[in-house]
Image: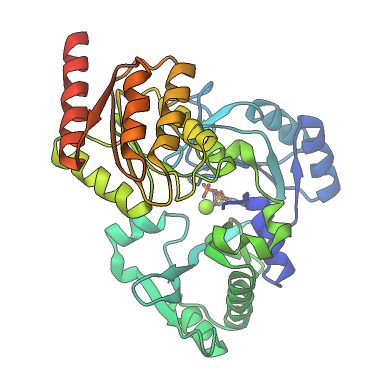
């Protein structure tokens, strides 16, 4: 689960990492009030969306204008920019073409920056450890640094038995070329960040940039945190930070029905039970020249309602030009699946080819239900047959259109 920058900063601040003062705002009036409360002479108006690259991003209604992070010198400018940014759609490298509507802003005190650094922590699956990554090339995306100058990324792997120690943090500080009192400040920052990472069950914490200011301070000007969904049950306060308007509506709907759904780019929708079978189904669709539109595992004990919800979810994707239902009825009975599919197909006015491969408990009864439905459902006997039927049907349907 992802959270907004201002929420991540609030959490990191609680652990002792230094962050600028700031106040969230949902309207231009709130933005003005926030700037007044913060005082000072330099403010930053920051779009809060769950995507990076905001500074270099552009608003759809003002492509030649300023980006999603604006440094301004007066309270009037804070309000004027807030007015323009709120409710506008921001497109960044990470949002894709569609962009994201900005619904909240973070009004933050502005700093005069001397150097921008990068520091990130993540779980490295290869070593099963938390890895600290640091670079002097702050402000740039880490993927870009990795591509252009991989030698500029310092990586330190932390043994979970000891956790991050002062010497690890100092190693990072020296690696970044820090000197004097910056070393102590960076060390404290890194250890606070590590404690937040582990205690909050984070998946990624990324500070880009971590800056050295003109006054010699070190602080996080940007912060990204994402959390392990499987550990959220023990962090009700983090779960409460969820912003559903930032999440994919289809994935939210899937979560509501306990379906494991991941949207992909292809045109063949898949409904399968079991993650392994779902992967195999995707593979075989590709083998026959098709492209899966999604990964969807309805689980072992799905009900008729859940199957119907899954089916509707697949068809809600406008790219879907054919559907393959592939169910092995072990715990689940094939007649229940058939009932769900028929009910959903009727409800959504099915208008794309549907291939169903059922196997297992009550398979004959399931097939009978499909036949009796009067719906144009193609039955398949095995995986290969199913994949071949659906890819051929989709190819024929699209040929007919063109
Ligand atoms: P993003 O990574 O989404 O573009 P950032 O929060 O990193 O957003 O902001 C982009 C850039 O704006 C930063 O690299 C930094 O140069 C500048 N910036 C961000 N916050 C401040 C601030 N409080 N004071 C001064 N400059 C800032
Ligand atoms: Mg950034």
Quadrant location of the C terminus in the rendered image: top left
Name the spot of residue 319 as percent of width and height, x first: 34, 25
Q: Name above or below for residue 330 compared with residue 377.
A: below
Q: How many marks?
A: 0
Residue 98 shows up from this direction: no
Residue at 18%, 10% (x, y): give it.
400
Q: Position of residue 178 (x, y in %)?
A: 51, 78
Residue sticking out furthest to the top? 401
Q: Is residue 238 above or below residue 23?
A: below
* Residue appearing at x 14%, y 35% in the figure: 289
What is the basis of the colouring in this image? rainbow
State which quadrant residue 192 falls in: bottom right
Quadrant for residue 349, please give it: top left
Q: Quadrant of residue 157?
A: bottom left
Q: Residue at horizontal 28%, vertical 58%? A: 148
| Left or right for 190, reference 274 | right
Percent across and percent down for residue 206 are 52, 61
Judge whether 328 appears above or below 13 on screen: above
Where residue 214 appears, as percent x and y from the top left, is 63, 64
Q: Is residue 338 visible?
A: yes
Between residue 239 and residue 109, name the one nearer to us: 239
């Amino acid at each position: 689960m992802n959270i907004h920058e201002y929420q991540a900063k609030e959490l990191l601040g609680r652990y002792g990492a230094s962050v600028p003062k700031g106040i969230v705002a949902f309207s231009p009036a709130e933005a003005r009030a926030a700037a007044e409360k913060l005082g000072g002479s330099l403010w930053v108006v920051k779009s809060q969306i769950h995507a990076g690259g905001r500074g270099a991003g552009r608003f759809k209604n003002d492509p030649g204008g300023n980006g999603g992070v604006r440094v301004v010198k007066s309270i009037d400018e804070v309000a004027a920019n807030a007015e323009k940014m709120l409710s506008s759609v921001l497109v960044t490298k990470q949002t894709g073409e569609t962009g994201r509507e900005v619904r909240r802003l973070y009004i933050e005190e502005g700093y005069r920056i001397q150097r921008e650094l990068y520091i990130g922590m993540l779980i490295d699956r290869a070593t099963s450890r938390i890895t600290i990554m640091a670079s002097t090339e702050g402000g740039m995306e880490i993927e870009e640094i990795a591509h252009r100058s991989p030698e500029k990324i310092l990586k330190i792997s932390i043994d979970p038995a000891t956790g991050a120690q002062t010497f690890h943090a100092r190693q990072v500080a020296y690696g970044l070329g820090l000197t004097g009192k910056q070393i102590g400040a960076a060390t404290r920052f890194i250890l606070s960040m590590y404690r937040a990472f582990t205690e909050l069950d984070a998946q990624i914490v990324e500070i880009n940039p971590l800056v050295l200011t003109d006054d010699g301070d070190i602080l996080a000007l940007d912060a990204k945190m994402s959390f392990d969904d499987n550990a959220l049950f023990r962090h009700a306060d983090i779960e409460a930070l969820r912003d559903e308007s930032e999440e994919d509506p289809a994935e939210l709907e899937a979560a509501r029905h306990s379906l494991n759904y991941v949207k992909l780019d292809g045109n063949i929708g898949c409904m399968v039970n079991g993650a392994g079978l779902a992967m195999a189904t995707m593979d075989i669709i590709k083998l026959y020249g098709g492209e899966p539109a999604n990964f969807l595992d309805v689980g072992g004990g799905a009900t008729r309602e859940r199957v119907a919800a899954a089916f509707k979810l697949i068809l809600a994707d406008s790219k879907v030009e054919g559907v393959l239902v592939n169910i092995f009825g072990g715990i689940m009975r094939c007649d229940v699946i058939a009932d769900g599919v028929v009910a959903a197909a009727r409800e959504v006015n099915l208008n794309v080819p549907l291939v169903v491969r059922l196997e297992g408990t009550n398979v004959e009864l399931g097939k009978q239900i499909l036949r009796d439905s009067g719906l144009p459902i193609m039955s398949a006997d095995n995986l290969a047959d199913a994949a071949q039927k659906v890819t051929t049907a989709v190819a024929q349907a699209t040929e007919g259109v063109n």
